Image: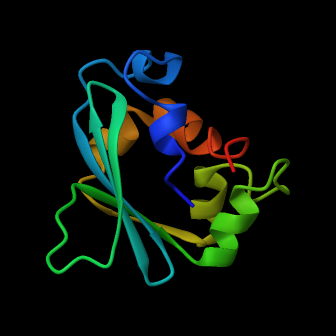
Amino acid sequence: MFQPLLHTAPPGSALAAMAPGLDWSLMLQSGADDTAVTIRDGAVTQVTSGPFTLPSWQTRLAAAPEEWAAFLAPVPRPGHHDIIALLRRGAIRFEGDLHPLMAHLYYVKCLLASLRGAS
C-alpha cells in the first residue's frame, strides 16, 4: 500500500524539494501491518514492510485498513481527505516524536496524498 512512495518522492523530486534537510524514520501502520519509511533530505529512500522484530521509528501514523483505503481513494470522501480530518474523527493516531510531523505537516500531507494516483 505504501511502497509507491519510493516512486512519488524519490531524490530530486518536487516532493523531496519541499523538505530539504528532513531526515526521518516514519512508521505507517495499517491495522496490524507496519511499513517503515526512511526519509533522507526530504526524499523517500526506503520503504520496508513488516513484520518487524524490534521496529525503530521516530513517528508512527496508525489507522485501520479501511481508513487508509478511504483516505487513498482517488477522490476521498469528506472526513477522509486529510490526515488532520482523520485525526479529528479519531480514525488515526499520531505516536512518538510529533515534531517532524508538525514541522513538515504540509510535506507529509502531500507525501501521503501522492499515493492516491500511484496505485
The residue lying toward the viewer, choosing from 53 and 113, is 53
Quadrant position of residue 39: top left
- Does 5 appear above or below 96? above
- Does 19 appear above or below 82? above
Q: Residue at x 47, y 18 (%)?
A: 13
Q: Residue at x 74, y 50 (%)?
A: 81
Q: Locate the N terminus by quadrant.
A: bottom right
Q: Position of residue 56 (x, y in %)?
A: 16, 64
- Does 60 appear above or below 9? below
Q: Is residue 49 left or right of residue 40?
A: right
How many labels, in total?
Answer: 0
Q: Is residue 74 left or right of residue 55?
A: right
The residue lying toward the viewer, choosing from 82 and 73, is 73
Quadrant position of residue 46: top left
Q: Position of residue 58 (x, y in %)?
A: 22, 55
- Does 69 appear above or below 103? below
Quadrant position of residue 68: bottom right
Q: Is residue 37 left or right of residue 106?
A: left
Q: How is the image coloured?
A: rainbow
Q: Position of residue 9 (x, y in %)?
A: 47, 31
The residue lying toward the viewer, choosing from 98 and 110, is 110
Q: Position of residue 83 (x, y in %)?
A: 59, 53
Which residue extends farthest bottom? 32
